[in-house]
Amino acid sequence: MIELKNQVAFQIRAEAEKTYPYECCGFVFGLAQEDKREISAVLPSRNSREQTRRSRRYSIEPEDFLAAEVEASRLGLELLGIFHSHPDHPAEPSEYDLKTALPFYSYLIVSVENAAAKNLTSWLLTSDRRSFLQEKVIEE
């Protein structure tokens, strides 16, 4: 289960709308407990995918992962996952998302239709790395 602070959900949706028709991306921070993850902060990142493919793909550079780790330490939180948007597509992982996913991270996806952010979901890679499990998202 993902507990998502309202301001975090707002920030993710705002970033998705701002970057439309391209995919946005970034990091989510919080605290992980046995059966839930409380996400309380985000750090938007640059989508480094080539311009012509940004509407269907995102890429995050290694130095941005390092910056996210530094930010997590500064905040006293854990780097829990990555958020990104799906412009004019459902908030469900694509095959590309599956191929590039890292274990233990939650993947928050927000659908954006005609520049308006809609559904926000979260997914966790299975241990065999063959699929995702949808995480229940509670916005508070």
Image (cartoon, grey):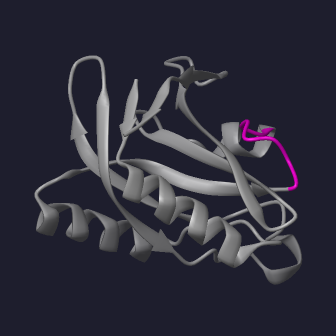
Q: What residue appears at the point 26 percent right and 63 percent down from the top-left corner?
A: 69
Pinpoint residue 112: horizontal percent, then vertical percent: 77, 57
Membership of 41 in magenta stretch: no
Q: Is residue 9 visible to us here?
A: yes
From the viewer's side, name the closer residue of 23 and 110. Answer: 110
Q: Please report the bounds of the magenta region as a residue range.
A: 88-94
From the viewer's side, name the closer residue of 58 and 33. Answer: 33
Classify 55 as above or below 104: below
Classify 106 as above or below 89: above
Q: What residue appears at the point 13 percent right and 69 percent down from the top-left corner?
A: 74
Give the quadrant of residue 22.
Answer: bottom right
Q: Is residue 59 shown left or right of residue 67?
A: right
From the viewer's side, name the closer residue of 131 and 43. Answer: 43
Query: Total of numbered circles in the picture?
Result: 0
Q: Is residue 121 shown left or right of residue 23?
A: left
Q: Quadrant of the N terminus?
A: top left
Dominant secondary-structure state across the stretch colored magenta: loop
Pinpoint residue 45: horizontal percent, then vertical percent: 50, 73
From the viewer's side, name the closer residue of 69 and 62. Answer: 69
Give the quadrant of residue 128.
Answer: top right
Pinpoint residue 47: horizontal percent, then vertical percent: 63, 74
Membership of 90 in magenta stretch: yes
Q: What residue appears at the point 23 percent right and 69 percent down from the top-left corner?
A: 71
